[in-house]
Amino acid sequence: MSWGVIATWRMAFEGTALASEVLKAGGSASDAAQELVENVENNPDFRSVGFGGLPNEEGVLEMDAAFMDGDTFKIGAVAGIQDVANPIAVARKLSDEKFNSFRIGAGATKYAEEAGFERKEMLTSEAHEIWAKRVAEVTEKNLNPYDGHDTVGVVSLDSFVSMTAATSSSGLFMKKAGRVGDSPLSGSGFYVDSEIGGASATGLGEDLMKGCLSYEIVRLMGEGLSPQSACDKAVYDFAEKLTKRYGKCGAMSLIAMNNKGEWGVATNVEFPFCAANAENEPAVYIANPGPNKTTLIKKATKEWLDSHGFD
Ligand code: ASP
């Protein structure tokens, strides 16, 4: 029986191992994806997702998350939610709603509270300290405020050939209040169709949204391309087009898996990610842009893992 999971960044490694156990034991793609994302959300060492995530310019931690069921196309999403322990759990619950399934700001937080989700002060003192230091640096040295962002995005496949896509992010560090990136937006941050496969994105949301790249990758897989060819075509063609027409292209890294558990990745920056399927144990891989619109992927060595952080 085939199953599989792929997720963005090294921070997803432990969650990928947990999700693999769920899938190996015959659990659902949805439970596996939620378990993976919650593992990342709960870890305060990961500075761009959930508890311990970095705040906006005003020092407020606003989080985005989305959940999509590839069997039914049900989607739930939240943006700018505050002080809720697991935004992904809220997004999943919202996916059951026929109306009002994408909630923002105070409305999202109120929904979570009324639905009984755990409230938690999500801004840690460490994250607050990093923010205060950055505010000083940005003012004194005129630095780019937006370094430091990453989304956990996941695509999972269970042995019943059901697929799920999920994302969670605190978005760009030092973003303006109310700024929302691609992560909770269907087609941009994620997309999944169990009859084909799924994809998810991380990088500069403002640019990812211009290409709806998660949807595009699923569409290309539906036309018969392998996950790797679909990622290469969607990402590198669009990065080229955007550079030509808009003058620049921010970081963009996309992951994809089809409903056989085969996966692919494309990126315009060095991009670590995690993957596992019935044949391959959970592992961290590193992708880099290669020649002629291809992607170079290798397994992370112990030295690499020892010398790099959680990104
Ligand atoms: N795509 C996210 C955003 O723009 C951030 C990231 O994945 O690095 O909010």
Image: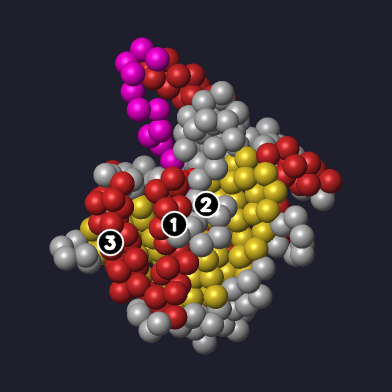
Residue density around tag 3, few if under 14, some if 14–19, many if 20 or more, within 10 Å:
many
Q: Are marks 1 and 2 in contact (CB under 8 Å)?
A: yes
Q: Is the C-beta of the residue carrying label 1 under 8 Å from the nearest atom of ligand 1?
A: yes
Q: Are marks 1 and 3 in contact (CB under 8 Å)?
A: no
Which mark, by number, is residue 183?
2
Q: Position of residue 9 (x, y in %)?
A: 41, 53
Considering depth in this image, is 282 or 2 the residue closer to the camera? 2
C-alpha gap between disc 2 and disc 3 = 20 Å
Q: Is the C-beta of the residue carrying label 2 under 8 Å from the nearest atom of ligand 1?
A: yes
Amino acid on which disc 2 is placed: Ser
Q: Residue at x 55, y 42 (%)?
A: 180
Q: Residue at x 60, y 56 (%)?
A: 66
Eyeballing the image, is 185 above or below 3?
above
Task: Read off the residue under disc 1.
Answer: 201
Which mark, by number, is residue 236?
3
| Residue 155 shown left or right of residue 223 in the figure | right
| Residue 273 shown left or right of residue 57 in the figure | left
Which numbered mark, 1 or 3, is in the foreground of this view? 3
Farthest residue, direction top: 140
Farthest residue, direction front: 245
